[in-house]
């Protein structure tokens, strides 16, 4: 006769578990009964298959199921079934895997205060598990004390700056971190009593209250062409003096680039089941180009303003190009890089919701007669550009189209910039044969023209050319034709003999020399460029002599004219020039990042 002790039975049954995503969950039970005992594990009624993350360890009277790096899909009911000739018994337990949700910064307000006041910099955040909060300034942690108070309450944090004074003006960064990642936001503190003083022509803020650049013209010359021929700056940014509210009331003070969250957002996918009108109020048209139209839009729940770019998708290749750019921008969450927030499938168009920037192109701003440029300002701009490119390279992404048009000012009354236009950007794998045949003649590196392999140093060459132009108003390799320009680039010969460099520091010239090296292996990387003495020196020691911008102004006007009048012809010249110089490219064919045919205008 079989007794209860002979039948398979549990001594210690399973118990329910709750874990955070990524943790290891271990179910264990002890049992008894006449051997041999058979043990089976099931998840939601399906036999558990062991593998990379799941393993089962069973001894004579104990069994454990180990689930490594748990995922939300691992949640559910687990069963351990034991049996022998005398009977079968089952123990049940639930596993709850709580998803790690990447933090988001819901609000970052521009804060103004008067001298002597207490400025409160509030940030609202979410995320699961609840993030840890850290405030920094210039990469230095800020701690509560006589000067600062840090308040945390539920889903918000506040940095209180006591007794505000001149040295407190600037950018404060809030980082919120949990197991899913980090969100980074920047809040700009402005002292009202200092506005007029900081914005005079003689100030170190490099702008003028009277500055009012001309509206950026759209390029309406093209009819046919590919998506990559168009630059973001032609469409995304509103014209100067644009009244967001479409009335006569004063415009709200510009925030720090409307930077409600310069942060690591969630992954953006093109939404097909949600209409853009369900989430955003689409308002005034900001601009129109060859491939689409940009509108001001406003989030219905937060009333935050964005730029909605509607891009026409006439061919499958157009949609592939958009998806490529969205995927690249998903990986670029940095304060110095234009941010993508959302995307919607609108039938024959895709609407991309992007950060709204109102400051215009950097070179257009500094070339204005009302603005007095200094080497100190140039250090600030180039340093920010290198920070953006360094971050891109850390993500294994090459920009491949660094040029003045792709550097934007967050506002006209500050020095903060953002890098834009990632239509030609691509992931870089050093194990692959990386070659491209596109770019802008003045700023393209020799290895592109020669159809040699490219790498991170290809972007650094472009930064060298941009810095040369910014400091002098001269283009180091510019010829009378695209072919002549490309030939000059391949020679990689330049000098600082022009009088425009007479008052430029030797450190600045050396910085350029370390980038404009024909052998790409010897160029400074983005990291070593940031460590160069010209960018790393104490801000108070940077040369602050004014730079004459008459040549820069002439260069910029010429470039605007060329772009507006000769864009399509420039593409053909560039293609033919590349073929003549490299001997390896047939006219009219270039390789885009996603493998489709691509062109790029001057």
Image (cartoon, rainbow, N blue to C red):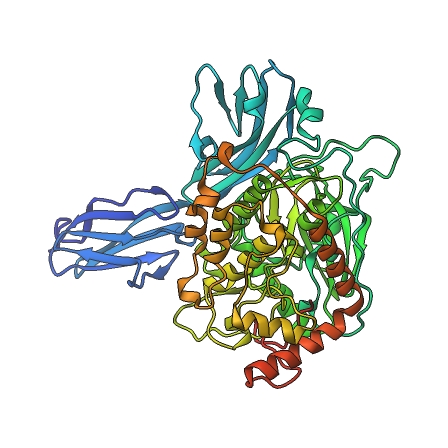
- In this rendering, the answer to whether 274 lies above or below 440 is above
Locate residue 451, reporting x and y percent: 52, 77
Q: How many marks?
A: 0
Give the x, y percent position of residue 74.
39, 53
The residue lying at 45 percent from left, 31 percent from top is 133
Left or right relative to 390: residue 310? right
Residue 380 figure quarter: top right
Front-most of residues 210 and 347: 210
Residue at screen point 16% across, 59% down: 37
Left or right of residue 127, residue 355 in this image:
right
Question: Is residue 485 at all visible to an observer of this figure?
Answer: yes
Q: Report x, y in % for residue 468.
A: 58, 55
Q: Quadrant of residue 104?
A: top right
Foreground residue among 222 and 318: 222
> Residue 419, can we see it?
no
The residue lying toward the viewer, choosing from 567 and 464, is 464
Report the quarter where the N terminus lies.
bottom left
Q: Looking at this view, is 207 or 552 the one in front?
A: 552
Relative to 552, does residue 156 appear above or below in the rendering?
above
Residue 435 coordinates in the image, percent (x, y): 50, 74
Q: Is residue 368 left or right of residue 541?
A: right
The residue drawn where x is 48% and y is 17% is 147
């Amino acid at each position: 006769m079989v007794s209860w002790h002979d039948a398979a039975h549990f001594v210690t049954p399973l118990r329910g578990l709750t874990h955070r995503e990524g943790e290891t969950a271990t179910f264990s039970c002890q049992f008894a009964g006449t051997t041999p005992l058979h043990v089976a594990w099931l998840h939601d009624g399906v036999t558990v298959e062991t593998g990379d993350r799941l393993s089962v360890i069973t001894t004579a009277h104990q069994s454990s199921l180990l689930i490594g790096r748990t995922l939300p899909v691992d949640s559910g009911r687990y069963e351990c079934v034991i049996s022998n000739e005398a009977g079968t018994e089952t123990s049940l337990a639930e596993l709850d895997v709580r998803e790690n949700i990447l933090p988001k910064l819901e609000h970052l307000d521009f804060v103004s205060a008067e001298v002597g006041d207490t400025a409160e910099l509030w940030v609202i955040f979410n995320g699961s598990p609840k993030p840890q909060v850290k405030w920094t300034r210039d990469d230095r942690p800020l701690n509560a004390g006589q000067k600062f108070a840090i308040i945390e309450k539920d889903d918000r944090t506040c940095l209180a700056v006591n007794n505000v004074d001149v040295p407190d003006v600037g950018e404060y960064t809030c980082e919120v971190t949990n197991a899913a990642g980090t969100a980074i936001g920047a809040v700009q503190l402005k002292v009202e009593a200092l506005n007029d003083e900081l914005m005079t022509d003689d100030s170190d803020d490099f702008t003028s209250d009277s500055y009012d650049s001309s509206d950026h013209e759209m390029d309406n010359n093209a009819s046919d062409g590919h998506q990559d021929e168009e630059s973001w700056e032609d469409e995304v940014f509103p014209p100067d003096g644009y009244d967001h509210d479409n009335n006569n009331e004063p415009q709200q003070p510009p925030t720090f680039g409307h930077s409600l969250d310069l942060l690591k957002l969630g992954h953006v996918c093109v939404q097909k089941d949600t209409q853009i009108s369900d989430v955003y109020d689409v308002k005034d048209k900001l601009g129109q180009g060859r491939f689409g139209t940009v509108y001001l839009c406003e989030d219905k729940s937060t009333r935050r303003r964005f730029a909605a770019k509607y891009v026409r998708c006439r061919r499958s290749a157009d949609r592939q190009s958009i998806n490529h750019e969205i995927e690249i921008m998903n990986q670029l969450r940095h304060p110095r890089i234009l941010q993508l927030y959302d995307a919607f499938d609108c039938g024959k168009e895709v609407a991309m919701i992007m950060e709204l920037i109102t400051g215009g192109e950097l070179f257009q701003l500094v070339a204005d007669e009302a603005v007095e440029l200094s080497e100190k300002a140039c250090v600030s701009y180039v340093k920010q550009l290198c920070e953006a490119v360094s971050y891109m390279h850390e993500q294994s992404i090459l920009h491949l189209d660094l040029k003045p048009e792709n550097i934007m000012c967050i506002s006209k009354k500050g020095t903060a910039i953002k890098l834009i236009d990632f239509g030609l950007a691509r992931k870089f794998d050093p194990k692959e044969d990386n070659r491209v045949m596109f770019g802008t003649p003045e700023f393209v590196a020799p290895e592109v023209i020669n159809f040699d392999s490219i790498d991170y140093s290809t972007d650094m060459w472009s930064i060298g050319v941009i810095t040369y132009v910014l400091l002098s108003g001269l283009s180091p390799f510019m010829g009378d034709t695209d072919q002549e320009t490309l030939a000059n680039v391949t020679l990689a010969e330049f000098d600082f003999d022009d009088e425009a460099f007479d008052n430029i520091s030797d450190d600045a010239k050396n910085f350029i020399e370390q980038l404009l090296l024909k052998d790409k292996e010897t160029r400074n990387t983005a990291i070593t460029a940031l460590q160069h003495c010209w960018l790393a020196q104490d801000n108070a020691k940077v040369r602050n002599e004014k730079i004459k911008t008459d040549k820069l102004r002439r260069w910029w006007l010429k470039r605007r004219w060329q772009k507006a009048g000769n864009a399509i012809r420039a593409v053909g010249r560039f293609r033919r020039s590349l073929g003549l110089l490299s001997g390896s490219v047939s006219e009219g064919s270039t390789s885009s990042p996603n493998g489709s045919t691509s062109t790029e205008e001057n």
